[in-house]
Amino acid sequence: MRFNRRKLIGFAAGIVAGVSYGMNPLFAKPLLEGGVPVLTMLFFRYFLSVVMMGIWMFLRRESFGVSAKEFSLLAVLGLLFSCSSLFLFESYRFIPSGLATTIVYLYPVFVALMMAALGNTPDWHVWVSIAATFAGVILLCKPSGGVTLHWAGLALAALSALSYAAYLVIVNRSRRIRHISEHALTFYALLIGSVLFFALQLARGGLPLAAVRTPAVAANLLGLAIFPTMISLLALAVSTRHIGPTRTSVLGVFEPVTAILIGTVLFAEPMTPGMTAGIVLCLAAILFMVVTENRPGRD
């Protein structure tokens, strides 16, 4: 069975993006337990990532040059991606993280609706995959009984999903930045994020360096910058440009799946039958989408 090489790269990059982003708990949980503020974590994950990406581009002699119009759009992309992270973390103050994760995974629906509004309606099998993966995420992240639903938390989680969806669509559809490499695109998105979170940290009083007290904290901040930030964002750009934002967003289901597996294996968190069923349903939905992409007559 032959597979279009461009699609193969896109699907592989989408899976890498989801798995790497799902590694957030591996580094963030020890930092939170160690008392590192959320804004400090967000600043360092973006700042360290942009430094490493910049060094990588410099060694490869890649161009950093962009026009003023291109930079303005890259700044918007950086703000959208950064706000997605910020809104998600802020939603945790009002609603359980499992419920927030479920709401945030509405972003494939938002992406599909945005693409449809732009005249690119997804095929039926993509809609089936979206519905199945969302059902799987509900099983994965179903909150316990007696949960209080606060409108602020629900709104913040929904805004996180909407920001992320808009980022994916702009990366895929904008002609203004189409010629800009994935490395440069990632670099500027990270740069804008690091500036934003540094400014917010200053506004709340205090410098981010005050929280880096031990080698363990520094190591976890570095891991947070490399895997769920730089690698994830770079793979996201590659995937979006190769298979489009809708299919890339469906592959994002590997984020909660990876996060839950890490919690179960490394942090001894319980794995319920519902969670197992959710993982199986999500993986089946992804397999369905990939197989139907290879039908005769599809490009």
Image (tube, helix red, strand yellow):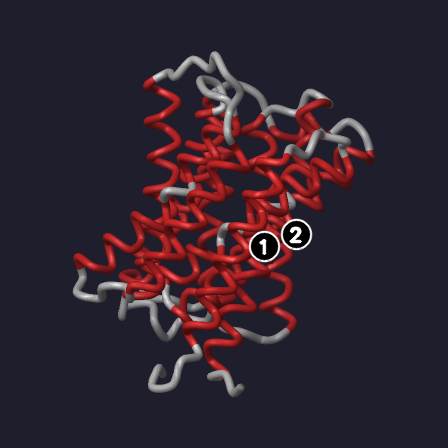
Q: Nearer the viewer, residue 148 or 196?
A: 148
**What amino acid type should be assigned to the residue bearing mark 2?**
Ile
Residue 8 lies, in percent from the top left, at: 52, 76
Closer to the camera in the image, 189 or 207 = 189
Q: Which residue is mark 2?
A: 226
Residue at left offset 40%, top offset 62%: 247
**Residue 281 seen:** yes
Circle 1: residue type: Met
Q: Give the vertical position of 5 relative to 162 (above or below).
A: below
Q: Nearer the viewer, residue 138 or 119?
A: 138
Query: Is 221 placed above or below 66 here?
Result: above
**On screen, residue 122 above or below 192:** below
Total tally of numbered discs in the picture: 2
Q: Secondary structure at mark 1?
A: helix
Binning the other alpha carbons within 10 Å of mark 1 as few (below 14), some (14 to 19) or many (20 upward) gives: many
Q: Which mark is residue 298?
A: none
Q: Position of residue 142 (x, y in %)?
A: 50, 29
For mark 1, what is the residue?
230
Residue in the picture at 41% in, 38% down: 104
Q: Position of residue 89 (x, y in %)?
A: 50, 29
In the displayed structure image, the side of residue 224 where residue 17 appears, left or right: left
Give the quarter of the figure containing the C terminus.
bottom left
Could you tell me which secondary element the residue under label 2 belongs to? helix
Residue 174 spot, x, y in % from top left? 28, 65
Picture residue at 47% right of the left edge, 84% below the top: 4
**Residue drawn where x is 46% and y is 28% of the image:** 99
Q: Residue furthest right?
A: 215
Q: Is residue 63 left or right of residue 24?
A: left
Dots 1, 2 in contact, CB < 8 A: yes
Query: Is residue 75 visible to the viewer in this orientation of the structure?
Result: no
Q: CA distance from mark 1 to mark 2?
A: 5 Å
Q: Residues within 10 Å of mark 2 (few under 14, many from 20)?
A: many
